[in-house]
Each structure stands twice: as C-alpha cells, then as structure tokens.
Image (tube, helix red, strand yellow):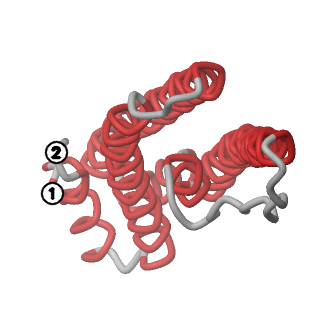
C-alpha cells in the first residue's frame, strides 16, 4: 500500500496550489488524501483482525455457532474488500485528476487549476465515501449483534440442560452463568465496527 500523500502527482498538485495561494482547494485535496489514507489503514487493520478471528472461530465447539461465525467473517471480509475497491477507485481518480489539474495549470493558468480542483467535487466525494462506510459498518454491526444474541441463547440453553441433569440426580439447580461479553470472537467483531 503506497502512501497517497507521497505520490508525485499529489505532491505536485499540493505544491502548485500552495504556490498559487489556492488554500481552500489545497485543504480540500489534503482532506481527501488524509481520508483515503486513513481508510486504507483502517481496512488493512480490519483484515488482520479477521484473520486472527478465523483461527479463533475454529476453536468454537458449537457447530452451528461456528458456521454462523464463519459466514459472518466471510460476509465482513467481502464488505471490507468492497471498501478497498471503492477506496482504490477514489485514489486512482484523485491521482489522475491531480495530473490533469497540474496540466491544465501549465496550459491555461491559475484559474484553470482552481476550476480543475473544483471539478473533482472533493466535498461530495468525502460525503459519498463516508456514507458508504457508515452503511457498511451499520450492516456488519447488526450481523454481529444477531450472532451475539444467538451465543447468549446457546449459553442459556446449556445452563438449563446442566440444571436438568442436576435435578434428575437430586441436586439443587445452579443459577445459569452468563457469558462474558467482553471476550471472544463476537466481542472482537463488534469492536471492529
């Protein structure tokens, strides 16, 4: 993953905007570059977490829960890859637009540069990316919540079965243990979102 802020076309565009006193446009470009870089880092970290979770999921004894967790991780990975694709497309478009803006400046001057940067519609691009990642995060959080509820129900059922066995043996039933929500795969998945 190369750093967008160090890409030659981006560096040249920012330098040209700075030298021509177009600070608003420069700030917009810097905001988009920072956002794209941050999203790349976040998505990379999330993929790393998912790899760790895959190993942990294999340790789950309940086949139904393990299968559902695998499905959730695969679905989440697909959404993360979608995010990577959108970020890469935005990054490629920004690099191409930066080159075009500098070329327009060389051919037609400062006004053409400002117009080229405005044509990038950076605030709209930021809004679009932000909305997409917000939707993605919300969907994945809902899936994780469903799985957490399923895990809690399975844990409760396990406790009730143990109590039935104790009652059959003439012993007193114990209060069902509640699973700790701060540990495990589902907890880690929910923290990702």
Name the residue beneath numbered marker 1: 6
Mark 2 burial class by Cα count in 10 Å: few <14, some 14-19, many 20+: few
Element class at badge 1: helix
**Residue 142 shows in the view:** no
Out of 20 and 87, give the one closest to the viewer.
Answer: 87
**Percent position (x, y) of residue 109?**
35, 56
- Image position of 16 with respect to 23: above or below: above
Residue 185, label in figure: none
In front: mark 1 or mark 2? 2
Residue 2, label in figure: 2
* Residue beneath the point at 58% across and 30% down: 69
Q: Residue furthest front?
A: 170
- Image position of 99 with respect to 69: above or below: below
- How far separated are the C-alphas under marks 1 and 2? 8 Å
**100 displayed left or right of 186:** left
* Residue beneath the point at 20% across and 47% down: 9
Mark 1 and 2 residues: CB-CB less than 8 Å, in contact?
Answer: yes
Q: From the image, which quarter does the N terminus lie in?
A: top left
- Image position of 75 with respect to 28: above or below: above
**Percent position (x, y) of residue 177?**
72, 62
**4 displayed left or right of 139:** left
Element class at badge 2: loop
* Residue beneath the point at 25% across and 76% down: 19
**Residue 141 shows in the view:** yes
Residue 37 occupies quadrant:
bottom left
**Percent position (x, y) of residue 23?**
43, 79
**Percent position (x, y) of residue 20?**
32, 74
Q: From the image, which quarter does the C terminus lie in?
A: bottom right
């Amino acid at each position: 993953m190369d750093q967008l802020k160090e890409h030659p076309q981006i560096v040249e565009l920012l330098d040209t905007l700075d030298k021509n006193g177009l600070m608003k446009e420069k700030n917009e470009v810097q905001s988009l570059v920072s956002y794209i870089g941050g999203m790349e880092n976040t998505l990379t970290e999330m993929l790393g977490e998912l790899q760790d979770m895959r190993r942990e999921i294999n340790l789950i004894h309940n086949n139904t829960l393990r299968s559902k967790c695998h499905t959730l991780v695969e679905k989440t990975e697909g959404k993360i890859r979608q995010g990577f694709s959108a970020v890469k497309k935005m990054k490629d478009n920004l690099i191409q637009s930066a080159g075009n803006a500098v070329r327009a400046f060389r051919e037609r001057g400062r006004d053409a540069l400002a117009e080229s940067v405005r044509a990038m519609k950076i605030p709209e691009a930021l809004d679009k990316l932000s909305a997409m990642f917000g939707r993605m995060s919300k969907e994945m959080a809902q899936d994780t919540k469903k799985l957490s509820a399923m895990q809690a129900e399975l844990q409760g059922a396990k406790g009730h079965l143990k109590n039935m066995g104790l009652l059959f043996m003439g012993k007193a039933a114990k209060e069902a243990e509640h699973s700790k929500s701060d540990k495990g795969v589902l907890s880690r998945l929910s923290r990702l979102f």
